[in-house]
Image (spheres, grey):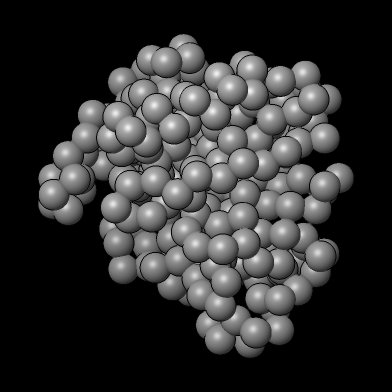
Amino acid sequence: MLTIQSFVFSPIMENTYVLYNETGECMIIDPGCYDQQEESELRSFITKHKLTPKLLLNTHCHLDHVFGNHFVHHAWKLELHLHPAEKIVLDYAPEAGSRWNLPFRNYDGPLHFIKGGEMISLGANQLSILEAPGHSPGHICFYSSSQQFIIGGDVLFRRSIGRTDLPGGNHQQLLNSIRTQLFTLPDAVKVYPGHGEPTTIGEEKRRNPFLT
């Protein structure tokens, strides 16, 4: 069984997730730690709980979701897993950081490409990869059918959806991704978004003004 720990990092208030199992293995999804204090918070949690980081994953590569990739890579020797269509977004992230007055050091290690339909494994636990472009060209989500949750990145929020005015965004594509990839999941599935509070698939089907 996977336990989910979230952190709110950076001035952009991004949700970073650490998922860990009973054996102490963990995966780090979208590390957004921007400064040394936030890096220390992430490291302290992993140390305190005696966790062994095994995977570094990005749902997508907008700057707020990749601020901490470099730190995680060098702290635990993890190599980045992302959708191939996100490489161009990752490469552009430092320029975006400069434009937002949030300079940072980008990830400089090997890349491992993952796509929809594949599985990510942490010990006996598996997450399905769902492709959900629209907010960004290669956005993916990580879904646990056994525990009924999804790490959704910036696709679906509580009463909102991801913005589509950034390079590579497409509003109709995002709505289609939500309807065909997320809204086909059971209503009870808990959605852990890239910003803000968790919600459920059923709640957003009923009350999300962008989709009702």
Name, please, the residue furthest toward the right: 146
Residue 166 shown left or right of residue 149 in the figure: left
The front one of 62 and 67 is 67
Quadrant, the C terminus: bottom right
The answer to whether residue 87 is visible is: no
| Image: 41 above or below 136 | above
Residue 163 appears in view: yes
Name the side, left or right, on which 125 lies relative to 174: right
Q: On the image, which quarter does residue 119 sit in?
A: top right
Residue at x-position 44% and y-position 32%: 41
Classify 207 as above or below 189.
below
Residue 32 location (% of width, % of height):
39, 41
> How many numbered circles does the render carry?
0
Residue 53, given in percent of the width and then of the height, sits at 58, 20
Q: Quadrant of the N terminus?
A: top right
Is residue 38 rendered to the left or right of residue 158? left
From the top left corner, tell me how far across and down residue 81 is, in percent: 51, 29
Residue 31 lies, with reference to residue 148, above or below; the image says: above
Task: Judge from the rendering whether residue 79 lies leftward or rightward of residue 89; answer left or right.
Answer: right
Q: Residue at x 73, y 38 (%)?
A: 3
Q: Viewer-proximal residue, 134 or 24?
A: 24
| Residue at figure coordinates x 69%, y 21% from the top left | 25
Location of residue 67 in the rendering, given as x and y in whole percent from the top left corner? 33, 37
- The quarter of the displayed image where residue 109 is located: top left
